Image (cartoon, helix red, strand yellow):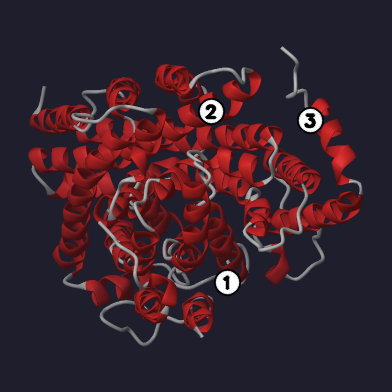
Amino acid sequence: MNEALLVILFFLVLCIWLGLQARKGKNMSLEQWAIGGRGFGSFLLFFLIAGEMFTTYTFLGASGGAYRSGMPPALYAFNCFYFVIAYWLLPPIWRYAKKNNVISQSDFYDKKYNSPALGVLVAVISVISIIPYLIMQLKGLGIIVSEASYGSISPNVAIVVSVIAITIYVTASGMHGVAWTAVIKDIMILTVVVFMGIYFPLHYYGGLQPMFEAIDTAKQGFLIFPEQGLSISWFISATIMTALAFYMFPHMLAGVFSAKSQKSLRWNAGVMPIYQVIIIFSLFIGFSAILQVPNLEGAEADLALFKLAKMSFDPWFVGVIGASGAMAALIPSSLVLTATATILSKNVYKVWRPNTSDEQLQRLSRMLVPVISIVTLYFTFNGGESIFTLYLMAYSFMAQLFPALFFSLWKKNPVTVQGAFAGMIVAILIVIYSTTSGTTLATLFPSLPHVIQDLDVGLAVLLINIAVTLGVSAVTRKTSIGMEEDIKQASGMDKTS
Amino acid sequence: MIYVISAIPALGSLVVINRIEPYVLGMPFVLFWAILWVCLTSVFLIIANKLDPATEGEEDG
């Protein structure tokens, strides 16, 4: 048992305690458990939604990305689209949700299109994409804790212990537990990242500019976008894609639903960019590591931050870094767990068994938390790939939910249920195919210029999605009443039980 | 009008100035430029929020 490990353990216990504390004085209905009873003001909401920007990705991914590939992935961390989309899209979504008693992301589709079957489809897509997302967080957590404990704890043990911890407080407190631990997490991460981001460049290079100049001399072209591959067109398309997908994630929408007012959402959108700037310190860490701990390959690059930290600091501080890194993974994971459990009970189980009471649903949601945890653990221990790849794949999936949601906010929704179904299914199949077969626009069209080849596959799929959605909608608009029955029967959701 | 104001940062952030020199605040220009737009996004959205009639008369906690 070393110092670093003690520090990490302390914060883990603090997390559980805070999480359990959060439920005091709350009558846990499903609405309370899943979205905090729609009662979060600007302060908690900020940490819930803006805090989502500081996950293991900030910690290992951003610094690792800068280390591995230089400037392009580093710049990718700054995404102004998030906020513009948040500003315009979230208030109407929130209004509709409040008016129609929507508590989960699939609910939204279900009620908007008046089709429980669509709710189920969205639920399935979300759960499938959220698993890689959770795995990414957990893998990151394993690496962080194992590194910070100087190898005295294996990544797998760290993952299991942490998953048990969040399962406990999520089951007990749901969204309330998540919100309060999120506050602690952000304060810690900010302190640690800002400190290291300033310290490393100063200590090892004597300042920022000397550091970048040294990198530029040692690695030509590392600090700008290359002609091909991670080029400017990759950057632009990937940026738009992730921004569209960001709020489609069930846990993000759950965060949105927990808002008390539209004003807190708009205020959030305005202040979040300032918060995002802090990621730059994480990038500085990655950049400083390039010349100090050279030759880390592949997934090893994600450890750049820790290798450098251990070279520079006492064990207790490495423990603090480890603890904040672990929390960076735990809080999003607990938010995801809450949202996933809600979706599975409300939008899958309830459709199958329409007579379930709210009381039963609430209990079922909470029982599902440990089940989902175990499933995730299984996949975490039986999968590979580096953090960045997993992250992008989940986003490609979630972006495919965007068209149906976006058009449904129009005064006159041009999309029919069938259109929404067709668009999502076609798009998801293409994403699965292109990911598993490694197809990119470059392998499909080798003769096209790089400007087009480097476009994010998800964005191309999204365009196909929109075309199919609108196309099928136009055809089915005339015959929609008879068809709706067919769809429900075909998907088997209307079982007469 | 508020649509225009909020669209500016979205479009602005997509204009990539792909060069290292000159260094600003110790950062390569391409990085400084990205950061600049993140900050400007905040400015524009807060302005849009101030001008937005929907914001008025709503309570917040």
Q: Give the alpha-carbon distance from disc 3 to disc 2, as whole Å.
A: 18 Å
In the image: residue A357, left or right of residue B49: right
Q: Is residue A146 above or below residue A242?
A: above
Q: What element carries label 2?
A: helix
Residue B17: % across, % down: 49, 82
Residue A265: % across, % down: 38, 60
Chain holding disc 2: A
Q: Which residue is drawn at 30% across and 55% down?
A: A46
- Label 2: few (<14), some (14–19) or many (≥20) C-alpha neighbours in 10 Å: many
In the image: residue A63, left or right of residue A441: left
Q: Is mark 3 on a helix, strand or loop?
A: helix
Q: Give the alpha-carbon distance from disc 2 to disc 1, as whole Å.
A: 42 Å
Residue A253: % across, % down: 47, 47
Q: Give the alpha-carbon distance from disc 1 to disc 3, as whole Å.
A: 44 Å
Mark 3 or mark 2, earlier in chain: 2
- Numbered tag placed on residue A232 in the rendering: 1
Mark 2 or mark 1, earlier in chain: 1
- Quadrant for the C terminus of chain A, please: top right
Residue A263: % across, % down: 36, 63
Q: Which of marks 2 and 1 is in front?
A: 2
Q: Is residue A192 above or below residue A181?
A: below
Q: Residue at x 38, y 37 (%)?
A: A335
> Residue A141 lies in what quarter of the image?
top left
> Residue B48 lies in what quarter of the image?
bottom left
Disc 2 target residue:
A346
The amino acid marked with disc number 1 is: Ile
- Quadrant for the N terminus of chain A, please: top left
In the image: residue A422, left or right of residue B18: right
Whether residue A73 appears in this view of the structure is: yes
Chain holding disc 3: A
Disc 3 target residue:
A488
